[in-house]
């Protein structure tokens, strides 16, 4: 299982801080698809993604026990 951390609007959309997804052997993009389909988190296209606290991209292959974080874009003024 892969633990997925959710922040800000992603957390609000899912109604929880994290979810666990059976995604070992799949790329991060698989997790993104599951979050959209199963948890209604539709605004993931602009999110940064980190695996085990290091920024990465959607093609990174996941291993059992990894932690994935979807971090929403931040704007300021």
Image (cartoon, rainbow, N blue to C red):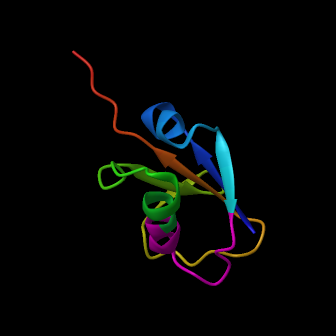
Q: Is residue 68 left or right of residue 48?
A: right
Judge whether 31 appears above or below 4 on screen. below
Question: Does 50 lie within the magenta span?
Answer: no
Q: Which residues are magenta?
A: 21-33
Question: Where on the picture, by quarter, is residue 25?
Answer: bottom right
In the picture, residue 64 is in which quadrant? bottom right
Q: Residue at x 30, y 50 (%)?
A: 46
Q: Nearer the viewer, residue 65 or 44?
A: 44
Q: Position of residue 59 (x, y in %)?
A: 44, 76
| Residue lying at 70% horizontally and 76% vertically, measured from the top left | 63
Viewport quadrant of the N terminus: bottom right
Give the x, y percent position of residue 12: 50, 33
From the viewer's perspective, is residue 13 above or below residue 58? Answer: above
What residue is shown at x 68% (from left), y 78% (from top)? 24
Instruction: Name the spot of residue 29 as percent of width and height, x first.
Output: 44, 71
Q: Position of residue 44 (x, y in %)?
A: 37, 52
56 left or right of 19?
left
């Amino acid at each position: 299982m892969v633990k997925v951390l959710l922040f800000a609007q992603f957390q609000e959309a899912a109604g929880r801080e994290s979810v666990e997804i059976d995604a070992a052997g799949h790329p991060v993009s698989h997790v993104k698809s599951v979050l959209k389909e199963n948890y209604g988190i539709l605004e993931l296209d602009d999110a940064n993604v980190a695996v085990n606290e290091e920024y990465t991209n959607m093609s990174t292959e996941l291993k059992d026990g990894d932690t994935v974080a979807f971090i929403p874009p931040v704007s300021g003024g």
